[in-house]
Image: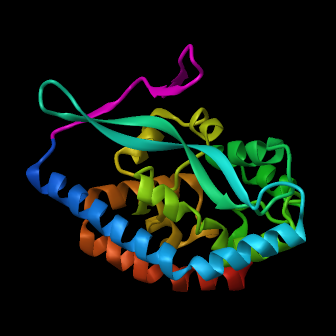
Amino acid sequence: MLDHTKDGTWVQTTGTSLAWSETKSLYFTAKRVMDLVIAVSSLIALLPLLAILYIAIKLDDPQGSPIYKQERVTSKRAKQADGTHIWQEVPFTIYKFRSMHSNCSSSIHQQFMKAYIEGDEATMAALQQEKAKEESKFKLNGDPRITRMGKFLRKTSLDELPQLWNVMKGDMSMVGPRPPIPYEVEMYRPHHHQRFQTVPGITGYWQVKGRSSIGFEEMVNLDLEYIEKQSIRMDWEILLMTLPAVLLDREAS
């Protein structure tokens, strides 16, 4: 679980020790190289689009920066004195294109995530601002905090593009479990922390398997299945499946 230290940072107090095979070490080295190649080349290729989106967000809602910064929790490997490794849950700043009005309260999202983690579908339904379709009942539909441009960004997942910078920095990978907000992690049960046994990603197994149609426990199970099976081949398969998954989710919204 995560605890506050005196200086206000977060630390993992129950790190998971793992016997690290050479194969696993080679995988994470190759994964990091792959992440850097994809992130750098994507940022260069997408620079005109990034500039257009930046301007469009500013024109749609002049208040606040088009780039949204938020604290999330990532996983870092740390080698122990006995040669084993431990996954540590540590905070980082995630970057996204702003899809909400400035200075919005997170209270409705915190309530929704509490209900989502607890599997409380009645509370989730009561918090929906718009009637949710069956395939999107596990996301907050009709969130009043979302701007007009924000709706487009979220439907197309273009709000995630600045996270390529997080990948370059090493906070995230191209593929991995979704990096949660600290208040979500505070609600986790002990077994939920197992999803931190790899680096979080921009896209992942959960996104291509169902996104908003999947409950929290099923999402955790998919994350754990990915952690068990993860390989460079699997990462490429997930990347190739991401665009069709986003388009299908867009149609269901």
Q: Is residue 152 left or right of residue 230?
A: right
Residue 175 in sight: no
Q: Position of residue 237 (x, y in %)?
A: 35, 79
Instruction: State the residue in front, 93 or 185.
Output: 93
Start and end of the magenta stretch?
A: 1-19
* Picture quadrant of residue 35: bottom left
Q: Quadrant of the C terminus?
A: bottom right
Tell me which residue sits at (22%, 36%) in the image: 85
Q: Position of residue 161 (x, y in %)?
A: 58, 69
Tell me which residue sits at (44%, 67%) in the image: 205
* Residue 32 drawn in magenta: no
Residue 227 in sight: yes
Q: Position of residue 193 (x, y in %)?
A: 44, 39
Tell me which residue sits at (55%, 25%) in the image: 9
Residue at the extreme left: 22
Q: In the rendered image of this protein, does residue 195 appear above or below residue 160?
A: above
Q: In the rendered image of this protein, does residue 22 appear above or below residue 140?
A: above
* Picture quadrant of residue 78: top left
* Residue 12 drawn in magenta: yes
Q: In the rendered image of this protein, does residue 207 appear above or below residue 217?
A: below
